[in-house]
Image (tube, helix red, strand yellow):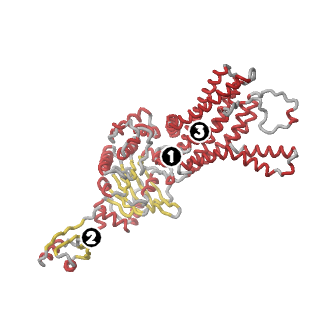
Amino acid sequence: MVEVLPIDEQTAQLSVRPAESISLIVETRDLVKRYGDFTAVDHLNFQLTEGEIFGLLGPNGAGKTTTILMLMGMTDPTEGAVKILGYDPARQPIEVKRRVGYLPERVALYDDLSARENLYYTADLNGLSYAESKRRGAWALERVGLDAVASKPVSQLSHGMRQRLGIADVLIKKPRLVILDEPTLGLDPEAVNQLLDLIRAMTEEEQLTVLLSSHQLQQVQRICSRVGIFVKGKLIAHGSISQLAERLAGGIRTLEVSAEPNGAELGELLRKIPGVVGVERDAEYWRVRATVDVRPAIARAVTDRGWSLFHLRQRDYGLEEIYLKYFQT
Amino acid sequence: MRGLAAVYRKELADHLGSRRFIILFILILFAGLSSVYVAAQSIRDQVSSSQNVFLLMFTTPSGPLPPFFTFISFLGPLVGLALAFDSINGEQNRGTLSRLLAQPIYRDAVVNGKFLAALTTVAIMLASIVVIVSALGIWILAIIPSTEELLRVIAFLIVCILYVGFWLALATTFSVLLRNTATAALAGIASWIFFTFFVSMIADSIANAVSSANTALDPNAILQTTQLRDMLARVSPNTLFQEATIAILMPQVRTLGPILLQDVIGLVPNPLPLAQSLLLVWPQVVGLLALMAICFAIAYIRFMTQEIRSL
């Protein structure tokens, strides 16, 4: 697990790290992309090690797709460097594209071709022989569960099926790294689950490394071993979700309290409890922030007054809070 | 090369199976069949022992129907525009372009493969139509074409493919420059109308404006005006195509510009040999090739330098 550090410390660490290590799949150094005056990606530093599923989290327009395009060698960085599997995508894009599967944000397939024909075209573009593309095409279609509709034109497939066909299309070249740009966008919950299970299963079976971008938190939370929070072109934090939550809380706990009576006198009472640093009125609860666990003290204080305690809960930082907290700053 | 071959194969298969191709094929085939049928009928009535009866089928207008080569000069641009107006921006709009460019191929394989596939489609289409139409003519007239006539028809076919190739290149350029396929199609049709109808009018007015009015009776001035008008009209690929096909299909055509009476005195009106006809149209053929190359170069450079986010 990678520690969560402020950006300047991360940069300092990078410069003293040994130059190359085999298990490093993706590495970026001070990656910058500017379009005119607009900075889409601002000094981005992150690494992906073999076998992990990394979630690039951020609101729309944060620069996720631009970053992915730079990793794929489809657009050149303004500054900084990228290494993918030891290749520089800006200089050796063909080598990178041979080993990296990329599923764009809008999974685009040729509607008038059948599912199988779409895969054959990709196989042909990757230089596979006809016999090999037949074999791998059948394998990939079976892997994503679309062998029954292989001969149907893509226009007749559902959105979820197309998304899975997109995964098959990525798998056919036997990539080592798979980059998925918003793979769950616009899918219904069941299709999302299917797709995420598929991504996780194939990561284990094929020894893949996966980088996926999303703005849908719960989904990322389900399958990613690590996430990076990406806002306005900057990676403001990365690490596992529990690490992010811990760091975000900064030693402060938040509690929800409600009692009878629930008026201002309860607020006064809560404020007097030692360790409490803030009390606010929420819709139906009092929100209490404290440096230590004050739950027993609150319960005692309320019952000592002869009031009834209805609700007392310590809130955990979920991804939602993490997300909102970081995205607001 | 591997990527180019893959794109070429896929695009060729797409074109040959597309409704667009079938509709255009039927349209041109029927236009060709009717014009050659009517021409052959009138040739059978009028001509007895004229030379090059076989070639006359392609050039004789009869009644309201224009000759075959005029049909090609009108419908050729339509074929070129229809096959290529959405070649790049269509993929862009469907989003397949970014998936295509994420494959291990060079970027120019996409635009080259598409253009070559469309050009091959055009060649297949025109060659089969010319063969079918010739067969009908041979059947009606019961004549066997000479080797020279056959070679002239092949030369005509090559000029036709070059001509449609120009329109393909122009349509490809629009499909790279314009994001919207409908706009690209309209731009193509606008340039078709411009080159077909307006270039000759504009050439006429410019030539008349340049030569002053009081030299109207001076033969030298008239000659100069005519020559200027012809040169200006040759900006249009339609003019180049018509001049080239007339000289190839009509061996008796000796010059493509104005002829002075003094040049004609003592002239034996024999048909030219093929090599001489080809020499006569060489500038026109090179002109067509150059126009096509320029259009394609614009498309190519623009496509190669475009930022991927705008693709």
Q: Are marks 3 and 1 on the same chain?
A: yes
View extreme (front): residue: B63
Q: Quadrant of the N terminus of chain A?
A: bottom left
> Residue B98's x, y, as percent?
47, 48
* Residue at figure coordinates x 51%, y 38% from the top left: B11
Foreground label between 3 and 2: 3
* Residue where numbered disc 2 is placed: A251
- Crowding at mark 1 (Cα within 10 Å: few <14, some 14-19, many 20+): some
> Residue B116's x, y, as percent?
57, 38
* Residue where numbered disc 3 is placed: B79
Foreground label between 3 and 1: 3
Q: Is residue B274 above or below residue B142?
A: below
* Residue where numbered disc 1 is placed: B90
Name the kind of residue labelled 3 in the image: Val
Q: Is residue A18 above or below residue A168?
A: below
Label 1 to label 2: alpha-carbon separation = 55 Å
